[in-house]
Amino acid sequence: MSKLCVDARVRSLASYHSMPMKVETVDILVEKAHFEPQVAVTVAQAMDVAMEEKMRDRQLVTVTQLAEAKVLTRLERLGSELRAELEIAVTSIRAELESTATAIRAELGLTATAIRAEIASTAAAIRAELRAEIQAAAAKTTSDLLRHMYTAMAAQMALLLGIAYFFSLHVK
């Protein structure tokens, strides 16, 4: 059917009804959906009624709002994915830190044990050195004391012998 013929039929049918409708809507229904003109007019009127009710009840969703909703949905999904990835990364880092801390504690324990052993062996060596030095000093002191003691005893003997000689010569 030609467009002029459909337009004429729609106008004639539309004149019977008081409700406004778009000619393009009826044209699409007749040409593409192969509806009879009266059926197309009825469907178009039903669509107009539905659209008017929608307009009264709520706002129509625009392409911009759909795009914004898609963007928001995508952002929410990306945020959830990012949160999940961050949780995995944080868990991984925590595990790595815990294993590193455990390794460091073990290493510090071994190092502390080695340092204690080294300190103990160094202290034992120092004690042995000190004992040897003290014994050497004591031996030297002992020998010096003995020499001084024997010298003092010899001097005392000499003095006593001198006194005895003096009395034996002068006291008769």
Image (cartoon, helix red, strand yellow):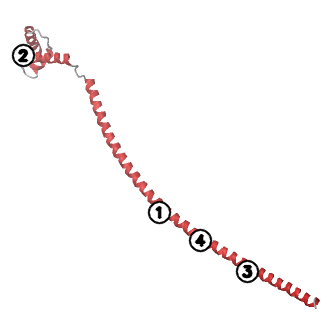
Quadrant of the image containing the C terminus: bottom right
Q: CA distance from mark 3 to mark 1?
A: 49 Å
Going by the numbered disc 1, the residue's amino acid type is Leu
Say whether marks 3 and 1 touch (CB < 8 Å).
no
**Rendered view: 107 above or below 159:** above
Task: Choose the circle earlier in sequence order: 3 or 1.
Answer: 1
Q: Which residue is mark 4?
A: 125
Q: Secondary structure at mark 2?
A: helix
Residue 90 placement, left or right of 8: right
Q: Upstream in the sequence, badge 1 or badge 2? A: 2
Q: CA distance from mark 4 to mark 3?
A: 27 Å
The numbered dot on residue 143 is 3
The residue indicated by pointer 2 is: 37
Residue placed most toward the observer, 25 or 100? 100
* Cα distance between the residues tagged 3 and 2: 144 Å
How many residues crowd mark 1 within 10 Å: few (<14), some (14–19), many (20+)?
few
The percent coordinates of residue 3 (x first, y second) are 11, 15
